[in-house]
Image: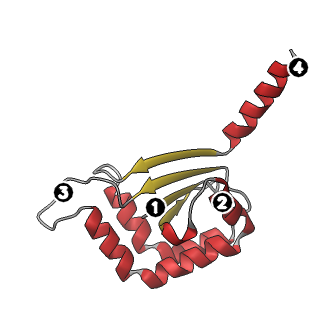
Amino acid sequence: MKTFSVFLAATMISALTITSQAQVDSSNYSESASAILSAGSASAKIRNLKSVPSVGIVRVQFGFVPRLSDDGENTSTLLLSAERNSAGIAKLRAALNSNPVTRSALAEHGVNLRRVIGVNVSANGSLRLFVK
C-alpha cells in the first residue's frame, strides 16, 4: 500500500506541470503569427509572472499549413515574420531568461531559449510557447 501511495503522489506532482506539444496547422496559424508579432510586448507579462502552472509548445518549423490564401500564408511566412521581428523576440527571450520562474519552466520542459519566437501568457500564468 505504501508503494501505491508513493506512486499516486508522484503522479499527482507530475500532473501539476503539464506540457503539451503541437505543430502549426491551419487552426493555430493566426495564434502563432500574433504571438510572433507581439513578442516584444509579451516581455512585460513575462517579467511579472510568479508561477507557471503549465507549458504548451507549438513547433512552428515542422508544421504544415496548407495555403490559407493567395498571400501564401504558411510556416515559411511565420519564420520570415520571426526574422523581421528579431528585436521583439530578443526582448522576449531576455524576459524569459531573467525571470527565474520562466527560466526554470523552460529548462524543466527542455525548451531551448534560442528557439523561442513567440509566447501567449494565460491569465493563470500558463505559457504557450512558439518555437522554431
Q: Which element carries disc 1, helix, strand or loop?
A: strand
Q: What kind of residue is marked 3?
A: Leu
Query: Is residue 126 in view from this perspective?
Result: yes
Tell me which numbered mark, 3 or 2, is placed earlier along the sequence. 3
Dot 2, crowdedness within 10 Å: few (<14), some or many (≥20)? few
Of mark 1 and mark 3, the one earlier in the sequence is 3
Note whether 92 is above or below 131 in the view shown.
below
Q: CA distance from mark 1 to mark 2?
A: 15 Å
Residue sitting nearer the eye, 84 or 114? 114
Q: Residue at x 49, y 68 (%)?
A: 115
The residue identified by callout 2 is 107
- Where 14 sits versus 74, above or below? above
**Numbered disc total:** 4
Residue 49 shows up from this direction: no
The residue beneath circle 4 is 2
Residue plotted at (38% across, 60% down):
60
Quadrant of the image containing the C terminus: bottom left
10 sits to left or right of 2: left
- Which of the two discs, 1 and 4, sits closer to the camera? 4
Q: Which mark is residue 130?
A: 1
Of the residues tagged 1 and 2, which is closer to the observer? 2
Location of mark 3 (residue): 68
The kind of residue on which mark 4 rests is Lys
What kind of element bears circle 2? helix
